[in-house]
Image (spheres, rainbow, N blue to C red):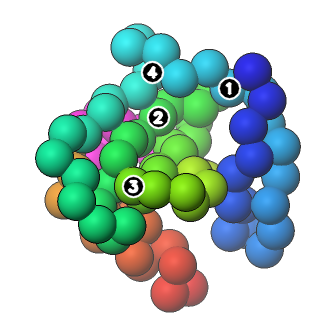
Amino acid sequence: MKHIVLNLQKGRLETIDVDFTDENTTWFKRCRSSADIEMITDYNNKDLLIKEYGCSYPVRIYNTSRAAIGNKKKQALKMLKQALRE
């Protein structure tokens, strides 16, 4: 399925073909604010998509995976904040 993601390396939105399944996605419950991480998804076995809660686009982070951050919400948030600062 086609989804729009924010590609920070290219500095723009792009459309990619990704399916969010139980095999490639970790969903986090108890999201209360737009700063909470809603999900993390492995994409093409080499990149990570991180989506905040609400109506935001997932952000594509190159060369990492859910396993690399231990499937942890806190680590995903830290990685996302760092990527947005760069």
Quickly name the residue at label 2.
41
The label on residue 24 is: 4
Residue at left offset 32%, top offset 55%? 37
Q: Say which element carries label 2.
A: strand
Residue at left offset 32%, top offset 30%? 26
Toward the bottom, the furthest residue is: 85
Residue at left offset 55%, top offset 57%? 55
- Assign the N terminus to one quadrant of the image: top right
* Mark closer to the chain start, 3 or 4: 4
Is 14 drawn above or below residue 44 in the view shown?
A: below
Cβ atoms at labels 2 and 4 below 8 Å apart: yes
Say what amino acid the circle numbered 4 marks.
Answer: Asn
Say what amino acid the circle numbered 2 marks.
Answer: Thr
Quickly name the residue at label 3.
53
* Mark closer to the chain start, 1 or 2: 1
Mark 3 vs mark 4, foreground winner is 3
Residue 72 point in image, percent of width and height: 19, 46
49 or 57: nearer the eye?
A: 57
Residue 15 is inside the magenta segment: no
Cβ atoms at labels 1 and 3 below 8 Å apart: no
What segment is highlighted magenta in the picture? 63-71
The label on residue 18 is: 1
Cβ atoms at labels 1 and 2 below 8 Å apart: yes
The quarter holding residue 16 reads: top right
Q: Residues within 10 Å of mark 2 (few under 14, many from 20)?
A: many
* Mark 2 and mark 4: Cα distance apart in space: 6 Å
* Mark 1 and mark 3: Cα distance apart in space: 18 Å
Q: Say which element carries label 4.
A: loop
Say what amino acid the circle numbered 3 marks.
Answer: Tyr
